[in-house]
Amino acid sequence: MVMGDFAQGTQVAVIGGGPGGYVAAIRAAQLGLEVTLVEQEELGGLCLNWGCIPSKALIHAAGLKREIERADRMGIIAGELSVNLPKLMEWKQGIVGKLRNGVSSLLSQNKVEVVQGTAHLTGERSFTVESPKGVGRFEFEHAILATGSIAAEIPGMPHDGVLVMDSKDALELQALPKRLVVVGAGAIGLELGTVFAKLGTKVTLLETARTLLPMLDPQIGKVMERALKSLNMELVLGARVKGMEKRNGVAVLQYSALEGDKSVEADKVLVAVGRRPNTTGLGFEKAGVKLNNRGFVLVNDRMMTTTAGIYAVGDVVAGPMLAHKASYQGKVAAEVIAGEPASFEAVEVPGVIFADPEIAWVGLTEEQAKEQGYKVKTGVFPFKALGRTLTLGDEGLGFTKVVSDAEVGTVLGVHIVGPSASDLISEGALAVSSAANIEDLTLTIHPHPTLPESIEEAAEQAEHRAIHIFSPPSKSEKTT
Ligand code: NAD
């Protein structure tokens, strides 16, 4: 980094080193461009350091504990289990460290210059980087903005990192709270709530919506409600948090519920009510980069902002705040800069919630497909009817559902709640993004006994020819 009056030139400046930014940087370098990446915290961003990766490590460990506790039904008897949380956190941190080193090596192998510090755009082709070493000035031909998002707060409950936590704090706890109240039963609330419940904390989820996961297939929320109960987690739907008092180090949350005003005590509170784009105070306006009314950077399907030569990807642009969306967009931006015909138009973004059971979806729900005017044919297959589910020691709560266009058979959506849904959904994503037909799924041999058979059987069920579930066509279907 050059300090003082001289500006360092670069062909492509990437601002932010998360899954949007570092992937964009590597792809741009692969395409022969000279790249500088600026990161103010850690390479890998929120996902690798304080999100996707550490949470999945804790989810696995907590699931393992629960598996061992329940293994006596298989004749495997373990002694009394205990959780050494600092040791668990150290193990998780080791994984994060290895992956972060991996990202750093990949950037260096691709000859991406990494600059540590906070970037501020100062014009349409320039930015500064502030760090403890001083202020450096840069000029660029193209820039990719990938500055991510920030946890939303609830008025009256400011984040203090101790009593009122965000997901980052929860992933670094060194002692298990006795009582945890999670505000928001979305992706973070369900994932981390489940972790702490399995580790032994009494977890209460307060959720404003009147149904759980209202944006998904309605049966998924129902399955998840049963699953939360079986983990002894309390879910309060229709709960709007109005305020919080601290009494002797304990949080007392007041909330309005369907049956009136209520309060609940907590040793820790996790606020998981969504995230907002990190687009203010970074000089975007000085570069003419326009935001929409919710603070997201306006982009077209080639990830171009309102300023020629500046692109934006990931959580700073509208759409699901997901690492895989950010990475895909990062590759699109890099390829567009290199003159390739890449675009983010009509790209299907699968979603996953790593609760227990896992939830995953891609494409249209049955309801959305009907709203869009499709004549819809669906097939549903329950996991409890699948041999592989039971051999895994899973009770088979959940199902795979395939939504198709009844007229031409195209697969429009796949919705899964059940074991390994996060892995299974990739077949659904391939089917939806390649406009596969129901027949493409039924004529593909799925090895037995495996969980992906649930996709084959769900597709067969749409045609009333699933083998492992009895579902003959209704009288009206027989006559049509
Ligand atoms: P979210 O949008 O998934 O869920 C927030 C929930 O909080 C919603 O159900 C909402 O109704 C509820 N809510 C909002 N205000 C509330 C209030 N005052 N009181 C009670 N409930 C309230 O957001 P999140 O769980 O915070 O996650 C943030 C982002 O990170 C999301 O975009 C999510 O997709 C992403 N994420 C993804 C994964 C994954 O892919 N597995 C995991 C974690 C987070």
Image (cartoon, grey):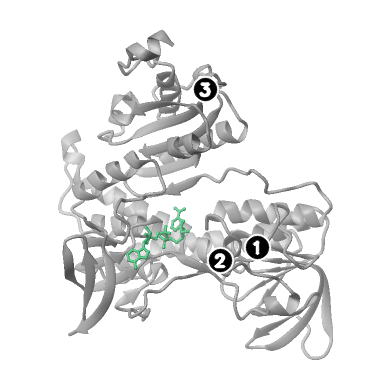
Quadrant of image for the C terminus? top left
Q: Check residue 21 in the rendering and tell me which mark sits there, or answer none.
A: 1
Q: Check residue 68 in the rendering and tell me which mark sits there, or answer none.
A: none
Compared across the picture, whether 358 is left or right of 46 comes to: left
> Local crowd at mark 3 within 10 Å, few (<14), some, or many (≥20)?
many
Specify the amino acid type for callout 2: Gly
Compared across the picture, whether 125 is left or right of 378 comes to: right
Q: How far apart, in angstroms, are the residues tagged by discs 2 and 1?
A: 9 Å
Going from N to C along the chain, the mark reached first, 2 or 1, is: 1
Residue topped by disc 3: 438
Image location of residue 114, percent across then percent down:
70, 71
**Residue toward you, 201 or 122:** 122
- Asked where in the image residue 193 lies, by quadrant, the reply is bottom left
Going from N to C along the chain, the mark reached first, 3 or 2, is: 2
Image location of residue 341, percent across then percent down:
80, 46
Residue 75 vertical position relative to residue 187 in the rendered view, above or below: above
Q: Check residue 45 in the rendering and tell me which mark sits there, or answer none.
A: 2
Specify the amino acid type for callout 1: Gly
Note whether residue 249 is visible: no
Q: Mark 2 and mark 1 in contact? Answer it, CB < 8 Å.
A: yes
Question: Regarding mark 3 in the picture, which secondary structure is present there?
Answer: helix
Quadrant of image for the N terminus? bottom right
Ligand 1 positioned in quadrant: bottom left
**Residue toward you, 257 or 341:** 257
**Residue toward you, 361 or 255:** 255
Query: Nearer the observer, disc 3 or disc 2?
Result: 3
Specify the amino acid type for callout 3: Ile
Note whether residue 180 is visible: yes
Q: How far apart, in angstroms, are the residues tagged by discs 3 and 2?
A: 39 Å
Query: Nearer the observer, disc 1 or disc 3?
Result: 3
Question: Regarding mark 1 in the picture, which secondary structure is present there?
Answer: helix
